[in-house]
Image: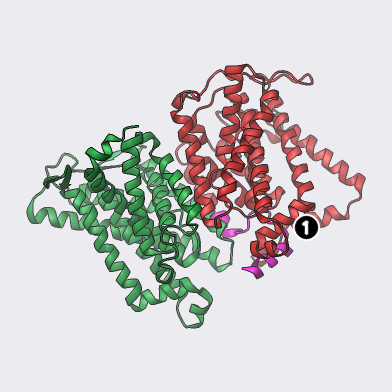
Chain colours: A green, B red
Amino acid sequence: MNFSVVTTQFWSLVLQGLALGLIYSLVALGYTMVYGVLRLINFANSEVFMLGTFAVLWVEIELLDHPVTAKPLAGFEMVYTLVIALVGSMIACALLAVLVELVAYRRLRARGAAPLSSLISAIGVSIFLMETMRMFTESRPQTAPRLLDKWSFGEIAGANFRIDTMLAIVSPIIIFVILDQFVNRSRLGKAIRAVSLSEENAKLMGININRVISLTFLIGGLTTGAAAFLYTTVYENTVFNVGFNMGIAAFTAAVLGGIGNIRGAFYGGLALGMMEQFASAILGSQWKAVTVFVVLVLILLFKPNGLFGEAVQKTRT
Amino acid sequence: MSALKDFNLRDKGAEIWSGWSRPVRTAFVITVVVLVGLLPFAPSWGPTSFLNTPITSFENVLVYPVGMFVLMALGLNIVVGKSGLLDLGYIAFFAIGAYTQAILSTLYGWNTWQALPVGMGMAMISGVILGLPALRVRGDYLAIITLGFGEIIRIVALNLTTTGGPNGIAGIPNPPTIFGFEFNLMYPEHFFWLVLFMILLTIWMIRRFTVRRPGRAWEAIRQDEDVAALMGVNTLVYKLWSFVIGAAIGGAAGVIYASKVMVISPDMFKFEVSILILACVVFGGMGNIWGVILGASILAYLPERIRFIADERQIIFGLVLIIMMNLRPDGLLPRKKREKIEEKRTM
């Protein structure tokens, strides 16, 4: 127990919590979007994230030829390298997510199987992807090259505004704003909301259900890919089972905010990231997960629909 | 293809079964039990020697994972299959049973038979503590709460000194001799018979429950909880009972497991195992005990049988899950057709 860190490092913890939490909330979107439309837990999303981190590595090391020992880049070269890595990871994740839907869910859905059957099929996909990657990397953690020189904007009240932390805070916010506008304003967004309200009625209104569902997986994959890029840039390493803990955390974040609802994923991720940072600072990092789950249980007891389940029910995807 | 889809082995089996008279049924049951009991000797007999597993001996594979997985899948089936509650942290009860046995035997010198009821009791108590709050929330949230519970138990075991931290507890004694059966490394088949006896007891208990009030209440809750509540079923109490009975079976399996392997550590009780047992239940056919037994036997045995292809083994396992669920979404032996149709109508 070390409560003094709360007063001495408060702003630093908040900043770290924001960065971690927003990465969580991007992955949480992969769960929450799919849950909103299909009412099933997209178990394979954690492996989509895992593959995204490896896609970033592949783009940086193989495609653009920056070995692990490469010096940090500067200027225009840095910008376009990072942008290509981000786009590559997003495309890889989006394609994989759509493929997962085709392989694991579509046939089962067409036959009207119980949601649990889809869950097991997704678990199969998850095991398959994880074990394949374990074989390719021989279970070794992989290091990412440090292409982004980690200079700092400065320190305010003990909080170090480092460039990678800022990147992990600003870009998710931009993505969330775009996504929120897309779902609430555009025609396709309207279709997604319609399917989530009632699949039957949406079908009667002439909406192509399969296309909407693929689109949902595509969006979930895109945001998960962005999260994978940010994760690799901030933590600079990855391993074949990196998706597992990330998946549990992101799913918890989605439930915390009220699953099936985009803004819920945003706030849920933030809350979870903060809780993890403060819990590991106060109690030690080994009790981090326990604290998070205890808080989650307590919140669900008093607000059974998650923190933002009711308030934004209308805008749920 | 459609013939394969419409064919339901479970219905066919039930039809044949109901056509038999009582003595025939008894004879059939005894034959099956004896045949299964003879399984540990199968690899040394010519025609069935293909069953033998590389690396771990077949007798030991029959106890863990096969026997233990069947037992746990039966316990989880009460929760997931019978009353339709998604439990993603079932391994926690197994861990509680195993640690109870380990602590009682190494610190206080209790033997397995004395620790067994305590282990089951501890699992049941934790089932109540978890279930009382958790069963009030909606189904999807129950999944995450149970998942969290499973992780909490593992992390607590990893960090406490009583549980030996990451090293776990070693030197757990084997069960003492009972009815002339010795339990040690020399006789893995005795452990198998013990597990088989527990499995039979569990099957008998579940079949009794199914035809009585709790079974009907679970059925009603699974199909539509609101309607069940309107009909006067005390849903919370019966959901709690299914949770607690499932926990007791998991705890019992844990106690036996700990005294079989003699050393336990937190990484035996990972989230993956919970998922694997859930996969056994769904793969075999939720709600149907024979399907669950078949599913658990296959999913526990298969990875051991193909252990010679060390690297690709888990990949094949994943592929089998995907292909099987796509071909038979309701599992290998689904529950009765009639029940399924009703389920769809309410959805």
Asked which quadrant contains residue A85, the reply is: bottom left
Residue drawn at x 56%, y 49% is B133
- Residue B343 within the magenta-colored segment of the rendering: yes
- The chain letter under disc 1 is B
Q: Which residues are magenta?
A: B323-347
Residue A216 falls inside the magenta stretch: no
Point out the image quarter for the N terminus of chain B: bottom right
Depth check, front residue: A184 or B276: A184
Residue A57 seen in render:
yes
**Residue that badge 1 annotates:** B12
Specify the principal SS of the magenta part.
helix
Q: Quadrant of residue B58?
A: top right
The amino acid type of the residue labelled 1 equals Lys
Q: Position of residue A52 (x, y in %)?
A: 32, 52
Q: Is residue A169 above or below residue A70?
A: below
Residue A212 % position (x, y): 42, 72
* Residue B309 is at least partly visible in this image: no
